[in-house]
Image (cartoon, grey):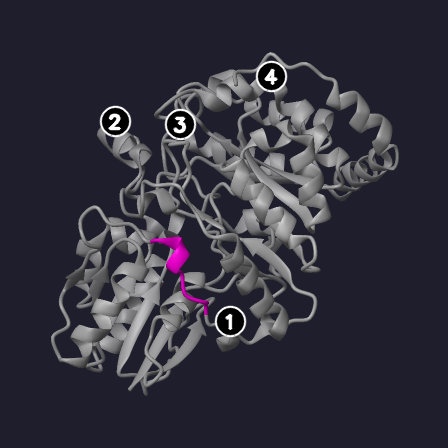
């Protein structure tokens, strides 16, 4: 028996001018060229859960064109896709279903749009794959594959039981980084967020020894790896974070992760991050001012409370030799046409090393999608190919969709101007050179932000 594991990889941007400008995603796209594409950690995990007597073949499809060629020697196909690639993933499913090969589709989009999956004759696996894949395989062996699989009610994946992903299935020459998950979930319920909180409401941590084992497995395959922690918010559980960082100090790796701005509060933690190999942290700043942040989170206005400390937080983190990739979401309900200048000014003042510009995107299954649909503000309700974080598909409150799209393009030209980028790079290294003075001053700052 042979199973094909197919990941819909690559980065999608519909607007051609955005590609020319060079909108960037950390580690994915730089100046309109795909320089890296992370492998599907979920499919590598499914491969690890597959019995040894079943042959597995891992493939990635960055782009499809007609006609396209796919292997036809599979007995079963599993497809993982994000929303922007959903329509392409259905073409792959159609290809195999037409040839009598059963198809199982999972991931965030399949979880929130199961009826679409079934409409293409595929089985849908809802939620965390670790809890459904063994049942899928058992039923398939007995010729009794069902239309839908869900985790048992009230049960969430125990990361202490996480299997070792099958990293050896990868052609490592294709990547400049590999992924390891250390936590799952996020306590902040941002209205627009389409991450693992759609699969599970719980925030969980993976045992440190399990994370280290995965990293050592990667190092067996790749002598000097760069690791991206596939977490939504890595350091919520500070006790776990300290244990993990202490264990990573001797692993000789470089790594990148995502966190919220509170990581800047603990200088000892920042020093541990740097000593353990952290080179960059992506932080969702979202907006440079209060109107954009107010009401962004469904549980509390945590980010709004942290806004007064944003610039100092960037300085504290970067003073430790860790670059910050600040992520901004343009077109939030509190944003007017002046938001583009305000973002640029914030970047210039703070000296952010990297910047990620996105537009507010209503992903299916999110509270934002439901609200904008009810308000009649979705331009195309099922234009999944525009769920790229860069293509405008909603009607903003403070400007026209056209003004938002053009504002993103114009701001991207300014933010990614080589001279402005070089200026920020030089500032980072200049301030790092005097880091002892900077760090001492920042350590004694008193902040009035909400704790």
Report the span colored magenta: 158-165
Sort mark 1 into few (<14), some (14-19) or many (20+) by Cα contacts within 10 Å: many
Which of pointers 2 and 3 lies earlier in the amino acid sequence?
A: 2
Which of pointers 1 and 4 lies earlier in the amino acid sequence?
A: 1
Q: Which mark is residue 396?
A: 3
The nearer-to-camera label among 3 and 1 is 1
Find disc 4 in the rendering and name its residue.
308
Find disc 1 in the rendering and name its residue.
167
Distance CA(mark 3)–CA(mark 1): 42 Å
The nearer-to-camera label among 2 and 1 is 1
Find disc 2 in the rendering and name its residue.
375
| Foreground residue among 120 and 137 | 137
- The local secondary structure at tag 3 comes to loop
> What residue sits 40% from the left and 60% below the top?
162
Distance CA(mark 2)–CA(mark 3): 11 Å
User: Percent from the top left, x then y, of residue 307?
Assistant: 56, 20
Distance CA(mark 3)–CA(mark 4): 25 Å
Q: In this view, does 161 lie to the left or right of 432?
A: left
């Amino acid at each position: 028996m042979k199973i094909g594991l197919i990941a819909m990889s690559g980065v999608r941007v519909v607007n051609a001018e955005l590609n020319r400008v060079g909108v960037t995603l950390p580690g994915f796209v730089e100046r309109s060229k795909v320089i890296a594409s992370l492998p599907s950690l979920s499919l590598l995990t499914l491969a690890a859960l597959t019995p040894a007597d079943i042959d597995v073949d891992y493939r990635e499809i960055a782009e499809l064109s007609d006609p396209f060629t796919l292997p036809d020697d599979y007995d079963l196909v599993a497809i993982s896709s994000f929303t922007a690639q959903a329509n392409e993933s259905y073409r792959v499913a159609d290809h195999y279903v037409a040839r009598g090969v059963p198809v199982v589709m999972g991931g965030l989009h399949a979880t929130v749009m199961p009826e679409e999956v079934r409409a293409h004759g595929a089985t849908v696996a809802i939620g965390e794959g670790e809890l459904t894949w063994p049942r899928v395989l058992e039923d398939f062996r007995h010729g009794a594959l069902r239309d839908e699989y869900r985790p048992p009610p009230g049960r969430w994946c125990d990361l202490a039981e996480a299997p070792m992903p099958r990293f050896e299935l990868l052609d490592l020459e294709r990547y400049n980084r590999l992924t390891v998950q250390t936590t799952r979930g996020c306590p902040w319920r941002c209205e627009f967020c389409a991450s693992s909180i759609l699969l599970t409401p719980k925030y969980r941590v993976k045992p440190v020894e399990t994370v280290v084992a995965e990293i050592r497995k990667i190092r067996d395959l790749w002598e000097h790896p760069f690791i991206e922690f596939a977490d939504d918010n890595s350091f919520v559980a500070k006790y776990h974070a300290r244990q993990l960082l202490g264990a990573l100090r001797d692993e000789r790796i470089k790594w990148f992760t995502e966190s919220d701005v509170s990581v800047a509060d603990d200088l000892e933690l920042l020093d541990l991050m740097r000593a353990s190999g952290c080179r960059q942290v992506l932080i969702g700043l979202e907006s440079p001012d209060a109107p954009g942040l107010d009401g962004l989170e469904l549980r509390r206005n945590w980010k709004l409370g942290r806004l007064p400390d944003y610039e100092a937080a960037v300085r504290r983190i970067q003073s430790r030799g860790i670059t910050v990739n600040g992520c901004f979401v343009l077109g939030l309900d509190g944003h007017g046409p002046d938001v583009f200048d305000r973002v640029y000014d914030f970047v210039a003042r703070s000296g952010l090393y990297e910047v990620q510009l996105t537009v507010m995107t209503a992903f299916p299954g999110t509270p934002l999608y439901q609200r904008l649909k009810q308000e009649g503000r979705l331009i195309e309700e099922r234009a999944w190919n525009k769920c790229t974080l860069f293509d405008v598909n909603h009607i903003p409150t403070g400007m026209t969709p056209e003004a938002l799209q053009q504002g993103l393009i114009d701001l991207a030209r300014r933010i990614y101007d080589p001279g402005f980028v070089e200026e920020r790079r030089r500032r980072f290294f200049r301030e790092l050179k005097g880091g002892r003075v900077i760090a001492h001053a920042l350590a004694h700052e008193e902040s009035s932000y909400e704790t």
